[in-house]
Amino acid sequence: MTSLLRIDQVSKLYRTSNFGGSVVPALRQVSFDIADGEVVTLIGESGSGKTTLGRIVLRLIAASSGQVTFSGQDISAFSGPRVREYYRQVQGVFQDPFSSYNPVYRADRVFELVRTSYFPHLRGPQWRDKIEAALHAVAINPADVLGRYPHQLSGGQQQRLLIARALLLDVKLLVADEIISMLDASTRVDILNLLISLKRAGLAILFITHDLSLGHYVSDRTVILRRGVIVEMGDTAEVFGHPQHPYTRNLLAAVPELHKKWRRPDAEATADPDGTTRGPADSDRAAGGPRASPAVARHRRWPARTPRAAEILEPPPTLVPAGPGHLVAETDP
Amino acid sequence: MSDLTAASPQAPGPVAAPLPGVPVAAAPLVPHQRSDLLYYALRNRKLVAGLSLEALFVLAAVFGPFISPHNTTDYFLPHLAPSAQHWMGTDYFGHDVFAQLVDGLRESYLVGALGALCAALTGMALGFTAGYRGGLLDEVLQLITNIMVMIPSLVLLVVIGAYLKTRGVLFEGVFIGLTTWPWVARAVRAQTFTLRSREFVDLARLSGRRAYSIVVKDIAPNMASYLFLVVVLLFGSSMLLAASYDFLGLGPTNGISLGTMMNQSTLWSALQLHVWWWFVPPGLVLTGMVAALLVANVGLDEIFNPKLRDQ
Amino acid sequence: MNVKVDHLSIAYRTRSGDVCPVDQVSFSVADGEIMGLAGESGSGKSTLGTSLVYLDMRMKHLGGSVELDGRHLPIDDNRAMRPYRMKQISLIPQYAMSALNPTRRIRRLITDLLRSHGIRDREVMTELNRRIALVGLDQDVLDRYSFELSGGMRQRVTLLISTLLNPSLLIADEVTSALDVSTQRAVGEMLIEFRDRGFSKSLIVITHDLAILAQVADTITVMYAGRLAEKASTATIIEAPLHPYTQLLLASLPEVGVRHDQVTLTGIPGRPPSLANPPGGCRFRDRCPFAFDRCATAPPFEEIAPGHFVACWKAAA
């Protein structure tokens, strides 16, 4: 079965300053596939690189090395109208629904943006029909949202509108980056169920989250990311049922559950799965200089040349099979 | 010049955390909030005072030459004190000072507007490009900006002026525009930089929009209040700068402006001869024009930025 | 009783009129109790927590009283509240970890705070150093700036600062929301430990995350649209809730081990009412599957079983 999206040894490095300074590896040689109509969850904590990977897939940033292929074509080779064609098939929805709307305009401008780029010949009633069909697919009454400003809509409505916008095109893959973490608990599940119904209709979803229970609810396969490296991946039931990597085990132990108390700390399940109380700030300080946000580092690409990934990175741990369709990163003995 | 840069308005920041059950206020100049803005505008003392005074001057500039009983070219007895026939007296040459004043007002406004327009367009074009594109282009544009900052404009004006037979209002306006844009470019670049990382810009990119369209339709409207304040500030500083150049004799070679009036009065020893009505009116009017604009600007900043409101 | 809140009502002044996010709220917290205050956005839980410590310019105290350790707490008088803050009652506001002054080192932040309460730093410093070690931070954290610390470390620092003077009541507003799941556990366990060691006599933990409360809290109070819906021990709320809102809320939470092809969870349709114009009667009525005509009158928040309070006609029946 050919995969829809293939991520092959993708790395992303950020420089912390223009002249000299250290390099922060946000992703290190990450590889996995997404098949047609499959929901893959990318689970990671902050600093794991999951959002970076999502943005690379959406072509909002470029990978430092490695390749991302969609339907067999390398996405970094696209330019101009080919990029627009790519976005006809791949779309994204982000964490903060309110920020995705330009507050100066009404909420349905997000549809208008799509129309001028992809359906310039459709106007008036035809376009309106298309919008209403998309809104019905996401279970929104058009009268509730059309003509309103973003702040007049609830978080759930805003998110649904953004999903409806993606449905106006021929999306085959939706990148959903923490799309429900800012919604109320009572609306979250409805959006999740919406995603599932879209999946049943053939949509593949890259579901990025830090919440293990959500990942478990919706996905077919799970990829667990830690500090830019895959530590475990495979069938969701397998990974959650028989976690092999200590990091995965610690994560699962730390998830608060309604009907079970946290296991009392033992040698394995310490409060901090990394085994130290030092945060990411410390490893960056060791690398030299205070923590710089990737956004800052991202903007400074010149004049210093960003070294190629192969030059400076230690290779990530190799993934070994640990069950049917289940891969685990080797840990040091 | 530099003190005006220090007075440049702060970027409107994010609004305070939402109150339960009440809609969150978004960025300024959101259409449905225009009535809100009007409400605050009418209650802001600084804005009302500044705008009223400025409006007075504008009216004087527009209608002054019509209501002035004399022309600037008419000759009368020199050094006449202000009286009923000559509301501001006459100067050394016998010209009516009031007539010169209202003509000069027009020229000052013209140069101010021209300078502001040039500086705004140049600064915004460079600022948006640098802020949106980043990378190599940004570095190059920053280099150019820094070079422009270092070049002393007065010296440049003297040098260029030496090569020109005549200098007109157009030249002065464009010159001021092309030498005062750096702070605009920097400010716009900084704001664009922040706005560029917002998610609605990502969404516009995901909708296949091109860079120019994103800057003009998505980023600029979110900075609208800031850009407005920048233009107002530029207007005031251009007028002041033009007056300074005119005072030094580097202004338009023919024509009357507030600065040239003060220049002439100094050259012809008005101060020593106690001919105060020659230089005090233009000086006062210039101060009033620029100060009113700056005060109104502060008021505008308060209106646009909810956190500065006295409420 | 450590804390007793009686029919408290707080209003916000806005351009469109008064909004009342805390409407006739009554509850009590015993010594040594960790009370979880749960609710979604717009429920008024943050306002309730903040109002016990500090009423800003926009807030108005409409009625009701608050008692701490048997003494009346003058919440509407900011100056009279000064001696209470940090010493008797302490608040960790939402987003506190992002609000640490980035231009000061942590040590300076603490000494400034202590000085403003008239306490010499020397007295507290040894205790501070001991507690720093207790929460798993290095001693050199005091000499760092806030931006040099990770999110979890900053949250621990805010916890330390707020409990330095051993307040009777600590109010923690969404202290676990922006954290990774492992740090959440660390902070949650820290809250319990602070109570166990007496750094704070009792706690009110405000969050939307019922799962965290299931781990940390002794009792849970559920708030909806400015009013209390239900209060009971954690076990009762999780296993046998009586208020329809609590029941539906619990039913909408996915747990590890639950997949969409096994169980389909449902959310609660509709939205909470706008607090600017709340409906009469029970505020959950529009979304409640059990609503009947009696719900047109607001049900009182009363004790229908020992320690179990509900505001619902159906539950009381």
Image: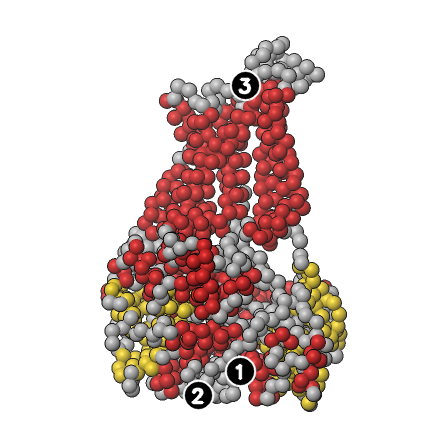
Camera-nearest residue between A109 and A8: A109
Image coords of residue A23 (percent x, y): 32, 63
Check disc 2: other Cα within 10 Å, few if <14, some if 14-19, many if 20+. Answer: few
Secondary structure beneath dot 2 equals loop
Instruction: Report if residue C53 is visible in the image.
Output: no
* Circle 3/circle 2 CB separation < 8 Å: no
| Quarter assignment of residue C76 | bottom right
The residue lying toward the viewer, choosing from A233 and C118, is A233
Q: In terms of image quadrants, where is residue A113?
A: bottom left
Residue B240 at x, y percent in the picture: 53, 32
Residue drawn at 71 percent across, 70 percent down:
C9
Task: Say the numbered circle drawn on residue B264.
Answer: 3
Q: Find numbered disc 3 in the image and state the secondary structure of the residue it sits on.
A: helix
Judge whether B169 appears above or below A175 on screen. above
Label 3, label 2: how far apart the Cα atoms are: 90 Å
Tell me the number on the disc at residue A266. 2
Contact between labelled residues 1 and 2, with CB atoms less than 8 Å apart: no
- Mark 1 vs mark 3, foreground winner is 1
